[in-house]
Structures are given as structure tokens and as C-alpha cells.
Image: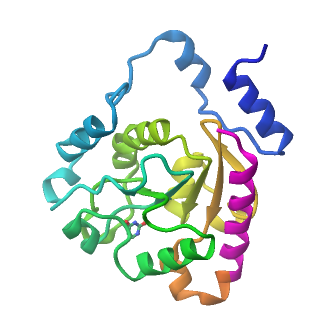
């Protein structure tokens, strides 16, 4: 009989989804390398761990950590880039104009800020809204990985270049990654444009709509 992981991979292959694994995934599974610091934490423990994190220099300049918002048992996990000034002040992701557009995008697919879970690649705000440094993304990565393990979403929606490139370990532009299924840790993943980009380029909204439709279809097909 197939193990659940094998079954999931067979299912993803049948759906035509590229299976992406970190280069050292097999090594990690076999060699008993050091466990991630958030290994085995439950949701409240993970939240505490993030709130007290000093793994990178952003801890010195943040007002609040931004753990994420929504349903910890959501079918949909939305991943953005990093908190901005308002998110840092309020400790909640996507609260500005881009957040309002994200709310409308969710509404269009019958979801809401409460029904999905929204997180970012970084839990702390980079000063002056600069891009996350690779070292910061690496320091924060296992928090998001543990959130994914605990939530077990049916679909991950990566919004924007930073989220997509970090999650998929790719340098491709969003235009090349969007519009087709990917996979992360056995879960279907779809890339789409960041709502802040869509505010600047509304003519691209129809492409995001088609990405949302693809994500809806994959979520329905995927039995987590
Ligand atoms: N942009 C993001 O990517 N994340 C936020 O939380 C806010 C704006």
C-alpha cells in the first residue's frame, strides 16, 4: 500500500504538477540533520516563538512581529512578501491599500481574511520597505514551514515576486511562474501578481483572476 506522501506525489503527478524539492531534501530526511528550531511547536508556541524572535537584525527595528492572520485550519494559505509600515504598527499583514485589494480578490473566490490564512515570507518589517535580504528570508523560513505543516492548506497562493521566488527557490519573474501549477512540500502552489503591483497596473488584473481560478480548481481537486 502507498504511504500518504507517495500517494500525494502520485496525485500531484497525475495533475501535471511539477514536484519541487529542495536539493538536499533526501539527505535531510535520511541524515538526521539538526531539526529546525520550530520543529514540533504547536500554534500558540510558534506564535510565542515568533513574537520573541531575534534571529536577524530586523528584530531591532520592528514594532510588532506579524505572525499572520486568519484561520489556522484554512484551505487557502496566502503568502506575501513582508510587513510594511502599517502592518508593523498593527501586527497584521496586508492592512493597507494592497490589503484591501487582496480582500476583494478573496471575496471574488468566495473567501475572506477570516476563512484563509495570510502570512508573509518575513515576520518583521524591513526598514524603508526594502526587499528582504536572503539571510533574513532564510532566518524566517522555518516559521512559515511550520505554519504550513500545522495549517495543511489545500492550496498556497504566492503573491508577488519575493514570495514566489523564495517559496519556489527560483529567480524567474512572476510572469513566467504564474498561470501554471507548482508544488511545495506536497501542496499545490499557484503564483500570482502582488496586489500592490495590480494597483499600479490594473490592466493585469485579468491574469490574477485566471490564477485565482486555477488555484480554486487545484484546491478542489487536492485531497490534503
Ligand atoms: N505587502 C506584503 O507583501 N505583505 C504585507 O503584509 C503587506 C504588504
Query: Would you identify the image quadrant in which residue 12 lies?
Result: top right
Depth check: 146 or 72 in front?
72
Please, is residue 1 above or below residue 95 in the view? above
Give yes or no for residue 209 being in the magenta stretch.
Answer: yes
Most common SS among magenta residues: helix
Q: Where does the C terminus fall, quadrant-wise?
A: top right
Figure quarter occupied by ligand 1: bottom left
Q: In this view, does 203 lie to the left or right of 151?
A: right
Residue 175 percent coordinates (x, y): 68, 68
Asked whether residue 173 is in view, the answer is no
Asked whether residue 198 is in view, the answer is yes
Give yes or no for residue 194 being in the magenta stretch.
Answer: no
Residue occupying the point 70% across, 67% down: 211
Residue occupying the point 79% across, 13% down: 1
Residue 76 percent coordinates (x, y): 56, 55
Q: Is residue 129 left or right of residue 204?
A: left
Residue 93 percent coordinates (x, y): 35, 65
Residue occupying the point 27% across, 39% down: 44
Residue 115 percent coordinates (x, y): 48, 60
What stretch of residues is rendered in magenta? 206-224
Amino acid at each position: 500500500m502507498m504511504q500518504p506522501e507517495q500517494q500525494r506525489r502520485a496525485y500531484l503527478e497525475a495533475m501535471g504538477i511539477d514536484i519541487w524539492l529542495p536539493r538536499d531534501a533526501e539527505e535531510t530526511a535520511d541524515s538526521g540533520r539538526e531539526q529546525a528550531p520550530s520543529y514540533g511547536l504547536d500554534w500558540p508556541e510558534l506564535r510565542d516563538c515568533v513574537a520573541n524572535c531575534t534571529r536577524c537584525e530586523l528584530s531591532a527595528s520592528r514594532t510588532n512581529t506579524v505572525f499572520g492572520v486568519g484561520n489556522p485550519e484554512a484551505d487557502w494559505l496566502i503568502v506575501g512578501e513582508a510587513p510594511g509600515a502599517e502592518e508593523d504598527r498593527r501586527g497584521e499583514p496586508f492592512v493597507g491599500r494592497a490589503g484591501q485589494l487582496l480582500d476583494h480578490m478573496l471575496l471574488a473566490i468566495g473567501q475572506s481574511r477570516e476563512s484563509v490564512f495570510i502570512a508573509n515570507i518575513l515576520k518583521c518589517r524591513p526598514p524603508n520597505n526594502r526587499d528582504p535580504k536572503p539571510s533574513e528570508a532564510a532566518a524566517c523560513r522555518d516559521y512559515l514551514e511550520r505554519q504550513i505543516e500545522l495549517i495543511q492548506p489545500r492550496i498556497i497562493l504566492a503573491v508577488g515576486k519575493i514570495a514566489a521566488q523564495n517559496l519556489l527557490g527560483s529567480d524567474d519573474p512572476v510572469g513566467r511562474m504564474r498561470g501554471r501549477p507548482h508544488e511545495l512540500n506536497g501542496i499545490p502552489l499557484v503564483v500570482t501578481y502582488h496586489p500592490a503591483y495590480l494597483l499600479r497596473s490594473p490592466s493585469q488584473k485579468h491574469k490574477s483572476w485566471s490564477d485565482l481560478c486555477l488555484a480554486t480548481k487545484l484546491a478542489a481537486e487536492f485531497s490534503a
